[in-house]
Amino acid sequence: MELVDILEASGGVARISSVGKVARQARRAAREGRVIRPLPRIVMTVEAARRPSAWIRAVMLWRPNAVFTGRAALYLAGMRDLDVSEIDVIIPHALPRLSRRSRLRFHRAGRESIIDDRGGFRTTHAYTCFWLALQGDWEAATTALRAGWVTPDELRDTRRRMARKASPGTVRQVLRQLLDRPWSVAERELHALLHEYRINGWKANEKLWIDGRVLFPDLWFKQEKVIVEVDGYAFHGKPRDYEMTARRHALLVGAGWRVIRITPTMIREAPELVLDTIRSALWRRHRGVLAPV
């Protein structure tokens, strides 16, 4: 078969021989910019290279026992709306040293026992979520939390696997932030602000029953019956979302809850206003300190 036929039959990504007619065609096509060579003996069309699934397939053709982590693992687990601009691949020490190749990033696994082979992506949701948070990718980490794929116990069990990824202090800090259960980057920033000023007595994204319905307020103080909602455009910007938000607000207020609405911009640009607004609704013992310690 010709190279074009092979690529058409394999969805734009194929493993080829390193010698022979097809290999020569691949080298010529790569020089002309019609295909790329992401890995040894792997050929990919330029069109296929726009899809994260093609890069994942390229890795698996090159190394069938590859371990994916980061956003690629979430993508394989079914989170297809997540932007996956880079594919993180874990490889053992035995493999030859590999530099970064376009969208591929390689990481050494050492002796970590992370291969659990769940859903074909060979790493647990908790490990992936924790790994993303340590990398500073809180958008993806909070997406995993919001999807309900990670439990607090799983995160605690995963902590020991992170010993070589960062300092013990950093691992403890990240675990605490994950256990706060932020469902967005803005919620994580709000949690950090409340911790900094020692405002306590709150829960985040836990079940609240109102008139037979289950709600998950962004953050709530049970004793004071105060709810803090973080309204971002990503989840509240469409007409249908706006309507649902308004109905949710009415349901909570009708049940006797005071609802405080803030935005991500307020948290980042006017934290004092956010703190003062929340403090005004709390009893003294939950108001925290006036200055960070």
Image (spheres, grey):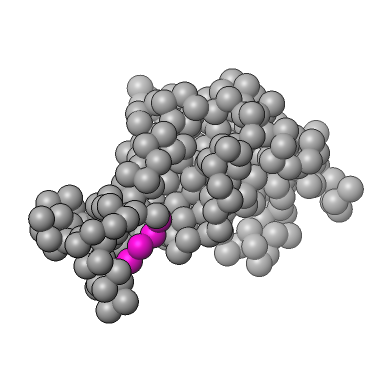
Q: Is residue 196 visible?
A: yes
Residue at 58% x, 64% y is 265
Q: Does the magenta stretch include residue 235?
A: no
Where is residue 90 shown, x and y percent of the image? 53, 41
User: Where is residue 143 shown, x and y percent of the image?
Assistant: 46, 44
Horizontal arrangement in the rendering, residue 114 relative to residue 286 (left or right): left
Q: In this view, does 77 lie to the left or right of 183?
A: left
Q: Is residue 263 shown above or below 253?
A: below
User: Number of callouts in the render?
Assistant: 0
- Residue sticking out furthest to the bottom: 32
Q: Give the prevailing secondary structure in the magenta stretch.
A: strand
Magenta residues span 35-39
Nearer to the camera, 56 or 185: 56
Query: In the image, residue 148 lies at what x, y percent?
Result: 44, 31
Nearer-the-camera pick, 173 or 77: 77
Q: Residue furthest right?
A: 293
252 or 77, which lies in front? 77
- Residue at position x 29%, y 57% in the image: 19
| Horizontal arrangement in the rendering, residue 109 relative to residue 198 (left or right) | left
